[in-house]
Amino acid sequence: MPQTIEQKLDVLGSFAAADRIRKVWGTKLLVSANGDMQLQEAGFATFWGRNANDSLTNPAVHNRVEEVFDTSLTKVHLTRYGGNHDFELQQRVLYAFKGYSTLVRRGYDHNVLRAQVQRIAGKAARLAVPIACTTYFDQSDHIPEGSRGLCYGLTVDWLRRSYKQKYGYDFGLIQTRQGETSQLVRKGKLASIVGLQENQSLIRNDGSRERIGYEANMFRDVPIVSNRLSKDVGRNHEAAYARRFAGMTLHTELSFRPDEAEQRCCGIAPVGSWDVPRLIRNLEIAMDRDLAQANGPCGWLISLGFADFFTGSREVGHAIGMFCEGANIGRYHCFDPNHGTVSGFRDIAWGWLQSSILRWSLLKAVPEVKLNRVSARP
């Protein structure tokens, strides 16, 4: 009998832990004429027992792989919004993607296959790991078209607002592009956020114009607004955020490096395994310690480092934020400048953080996560 969709996904997932995946003699995926799939172990048969009709570089073959993902991801999406979410299928398809992307990365130097992996990643992120929001927010609605992202500046600004018990930008769930943009500009917020974004390296170096690249807040607390603030607005825009962010401090930076296997599809394991990723556990321990020391409201800037999954070259990262109203209250607020805000108690917050990191790690490799407690004057 032909394989079920679940059986095909399990074959693809087996490559996540497969040994000896190589470009020539390595373990490969064998797709038969009827679409059935199997893992072919490395060795003589892998090299000599293949032909153009069953090679993954053949469009007819790798299109069958994409069909499997399209079918299963659509089912995950439909069951989620139909109120009967199939968690097992979700885990199975994400682990299959982890296996397939590993196979392509280690076994094929092929641009078409790499592009296909990224295309499947986008579908998986959108359909299998959506970021549910209490309040909608998308930075692309607030910045000029074609401009670079302002995730760092917007996250720090959101943390500033959170210390004033403002946990969103009050734009609701309706996307009104022109109205939102004009409101940010009219209130003078955008200029200060841009200034903060452009000067993040300067801020992390404690305002020093020397030895840029050395980050002071790796070893000690750093005021966001330096007492050596430059008045040359045209050069570094520090004056734009001087008043708005005065009193905010980045506390000593902590850096976490996920295991290589967790840098892509963080936390995804075979069906039946629900272990919390080591990265998430370490973040939770650090943030609980910060919360105890803060003895009140506490906010965090979480910086995700990105790298190209295939080449390892570093890319521009992303910033997200979390805020707790206090250990005695236990209510958390979470913010991703590409999605919006989520509010709830501890389980909601940690579920959101794990899903957010997973979602980004589908699209990029995440070789490093940095954590800064951010405080503000009462």
Image (spheres, rainbow, N blue to C red):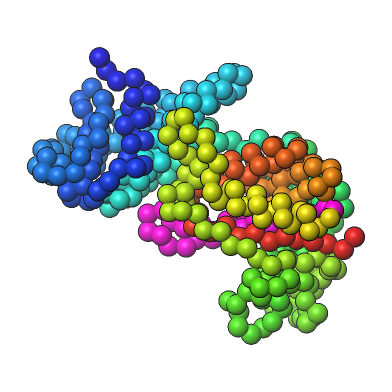
Give the residue at the far right of this rendering.
378
Q: Is residue 26 above or below residue 83?
A: below
The residue drawn where x is 46% and y is 29% is 272
Q: Any magenta on residue 268?
A: no
Residue 43 location in percent, x, y? 14, 44
Residue 203 location in percent, x, y? 70, 72
Is 241 on the left or on the right of 201, as rendered?
A: right
Is 215 on the left or on the right of 39, as rendered?
A: right
Give the residue at the far bottom of this rendering.
210
Q: Is residue 191 above or below residue 270?
A: below
Residue 361 location in percent, x, y? 50, 47
The residue drawn where x is 17% and y is 34% is 53
Please tell me whether the stretch drawn in magenta is mainly helix, strand or loop: strand
Which quarter of the rendered picture does the N terminus lie within?
top left
| Bounds of the magenta segment | 296-319
Q: How many marks?
A: 0
Which quarter of the rendered picture does the C terminus lie within?
bottom right
Q: Any magenta on residue 309?
A: yes
Residue 175 location in percent, x, y? 71, 39
Q: Quarter of the image holding residue 92?
A: top left
Is any part of residue 144 visible from this angle?
no
The residue drawn where x is 47% and y is 26% is 89
Is 231 on the left or on the right of 358, as rendered?
A: right
Is 96 on the left or on the right of 130, as rendered?
A: left
Q: Quarter of the image holding residue 9?
A: top left
Q: Is residue 116 above or below residue 250?
A: above
Is any part of residue 263 visible from this angle?
yes
Seen from the viewer's position, the closer of residues 200 and 92 is 92
